[in-house]
Structure formats: structure tokens, C-alpha cells
Image (cartoon, rainbow, N blue to C red):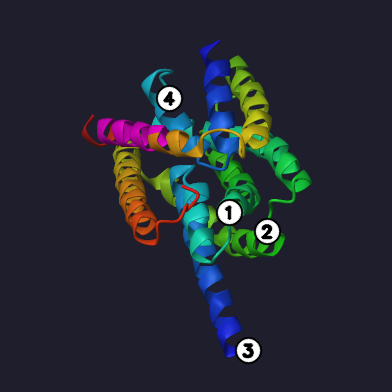
């Protein structure tokens, strides 16, 4: 049952294009007892149906920049194969710590961005959509 | 002409980096893709939606490697996650322009900081 709930939360955030996996992986390792590798594999797999549904909706709303997405996707393929191979070399324990570091970095970066945006809004005194 | 090709290079390097992260961490590529797109002057809504398309082929490629390495358990739990993810994905895309993005953003940031520190020092 909790898997269904975790899936919905993941889908909601992921469907908004905000990184559902970044949330799903800690849920899986923390509450549902998956290893770091399993959580990452599950996330990749679960991203597929979720993204197809979300993408169909976004395409309908014409919110997708096809050209840029395709350039990033094509050039990213090599990187994703390399990255996945690299992950298989690491122990789950170490990978988990690295992932934690990645999350902390990401969180701090977002706070930094948020502060910058706030300053900008103050400066221009214009609504900035954040 | 020269400027355009330079821009293409930037995109290719971005794509490579996004792919690396997405493959290595099994996630996170989308978050970086959104950041990269915002810097390439794509609007916020378009960036979020386009990131999903950019990541989809990368995730398929990485998922195949993970699967071959035996990191993808296929049980009842997996299908529940699958179903929940699909339903949530549809809902999230529907609601992207209706939910209070600012609050969700803050909650999201808080959540990744907490789980990040926990994983880093566990």
C-alpha cells in the first residue's frame, strides 16, 4: 500500500517536472528498505510510465521545447550509459552517501537561487513568477 | 554562425552532464536539466515540461543497464509504484500551472535537505 502512496507522491512531483526521483529514492531506502542501487533502479523504471503520461499532458498544453529537449537527450545518452555503468562499480553504501551529498548540494543551491530571486524581485519591484 | 555552433556545444556538454548524473544517481538529471534550460532562456513552465522529454530516453538507457546488473526488483511493490507514479504524473502535469509552485518548491527543498543530510551521515 505504501508503495502506491510513494508512487503517487513521486508522480505528482515528477509530473510537475521537479525531480520526483530525488524524493522517491530517499523514501524507498528510508521507509521501504530498498538498497541504494535498488532504489535508483526502481526510480529509473517508474519514471517511464509516469513521464509518458505527464509528457502527453504537457505536449497537449504545448509546454515542451522539442528541439532543445532532443539535443539534450541525444547528447545525454552517452553520459547516461557511462553513469549507470559507473554506479555499478560503487558499493551501495558509498553510493548512498554520494547521493546524500548530491541532495545537500542541490538543496543549498536551491536556497541560494531563492535568495537571489528574492533580491531581484526587491530590486526591480516586479513580480518575477517565483 | 559561430555563435550558434558555440551554443550547440554548450547544449551537448549540458546533455552529457545530465546523462552522467541521471545514470549514476538514477535520478536528478531532470532537476539539472531544468536549471540548464532556465539558463538557456527557456521559460519556467517550458523548462519543467521539456526536462521530462529530455530525460526520458536517458532513463530508458540507464534503466536497461540497472536491470542487466540486477538492481531492479520486479515484484508486486514495483507494479504499485508504477501505477501510483503514472496516476501522480498525470495529476502533476494537470496541476503544474494551478498549484502554488512557491510553497511546493520550498517543501521540496526542505525535504531533499533533510534526506540528503540523513543519507550523507547515516
Residue holding disc 3: B1
Q: Is residue A61 magenta?
A: no
Note whether residue A82 is visible: no
Are there few (<14), some (14-19), or many (20+) residues within 10 Å of tag 2?
A: many
Range drawn in magenta: B107-118
Q: Residue at x 67, y 25 (%)?
A: B87
Task: From the image, state whether disc 4 or disc 3 is nearer to you.
Answer: 3
> Which element type, helix, strand or loop, lies under badge 1?
helix
Q: Locate the C terminus of chain B and report the quarter of the image it occupies.
A: top left
Residue holding disc 2: A65
Q: Picture quarter containing residue B109?
A: top left
Q: CA separation, marks 2 and 4?
A: 31 Å
- Are the numbered discs 1 and 2 placed on the same chain, yes or no? no
Are there few (<14), some (14-19), or many (20+) residues within 10 Å of tag 3?
A: few
- Are the numbered discs 4 and 3 placed on the same chain, yes or no? no
* Residue positioned most to the right: A60
Q: Is residue B113 magenta?
A: yes
Q: Locate the N terminus of chain B and report the quarter of the image it occupies.
A: bottom right
Q: CA separation, marks 1 and 2?
A: 8 Å
Which labelled disc corresponds to residue A27? 4
Which labelled disc corresponds to residue B47? 1
> Which element type, helix, strand or loop, lies under badge 2?
loop
Q: Residue at x 50, y 49 (%)?
A: A129
Question: What chain is tagged by disc 3?
Answer: B
Point out residue B8 in the picture as x, y percentages from the top left corner: 58, 75
Q: Are marks 1 and 2 in contact (CB under 8 Å)?
A: yes
Q: Residue at x 39, y 46 (%)?
A: A89
Along the polypeptide, which appears first: circle 2 or circle 4?
4
Are there few (<14), some (14-19), or many (20+) residues within 10 Å of tag 4?
A: some
Q: Are marks 4 and 3 in contact (CB under 8 Å)?
A: no
Along the polypeptide, which appears first: circle 3 or circle 1?
3
Amino acid at each position: 500500500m505504501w508503495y502506491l502512496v510513494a508512487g503517487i507522491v513521486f508522480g505528482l512531483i515528477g509530473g510537475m517536472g521537479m525531480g520526483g526521483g530525488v524524493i522517491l529514492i530517499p523514501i524507498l531506502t528510508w521507509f521501504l528498505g530498498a538498497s541504494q542501487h535498488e532504489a535508483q533502479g526502481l526510480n529509473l523504471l517508474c519514471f517511464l510510465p509516469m513521464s509518458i503520461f505527464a509528457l502527453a499532458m504537457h505536449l497537449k498544453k504545448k509546454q515542451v521545447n522539442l528541439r532543445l529537449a532532443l539535443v539534450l537527450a541525444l547528447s545525454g545518452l552517452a553520459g547516461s550509459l557511462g553513469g549507470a555503468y559507473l554506479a555499478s562499480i560503487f558499493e551501495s553504501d558509498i553510493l548512498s552517501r554520494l547521493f546524500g551529498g548530491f541532495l545537500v548540494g542541490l538543496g543549498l543551491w536551491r536556497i541560494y537561487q531563492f535568495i537571489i530571486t528574492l533580491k531581484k524581485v526587491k530590486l526591480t519591484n516586479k513580480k518575477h513568477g517565483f | 554562425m559561430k555563435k550558434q555552433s558555440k551554443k550547440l556545444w554548450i547544449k551537448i556538454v549540458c546533455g552529457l552532464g545530465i546523462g552522467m548524473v541521471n545514470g549514476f544517481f538514477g535520478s536528478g538529471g531532470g532537476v539539472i536539466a531544468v536549471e540548464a534550460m532556465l539558463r538557456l532562456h527557456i521559460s519556467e513552465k517550458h523548462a519543467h515540461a521539456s526536462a521530462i522529454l529530455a530525460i526520458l530516453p536517458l532513463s530508458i538507457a540507464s534503466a536497461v543497464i540497472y536491470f542487466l546488473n540486477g538492481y531492479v526488483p520486479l515484484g508486486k511493490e514495483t507494479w504499485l509504484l508504477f501505477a501510483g507514479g503514472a496516476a501522480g504524473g498525470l495529476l502533476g502535469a494537470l496541476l503544474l500551472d494551478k498549484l502554488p509552485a512557491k510553497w511546493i518548491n520550498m517543501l521540496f527543498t526542505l525535504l531533499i535537505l533533510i534526506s540528503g543530510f540523513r543519507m550523507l551521515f547515516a
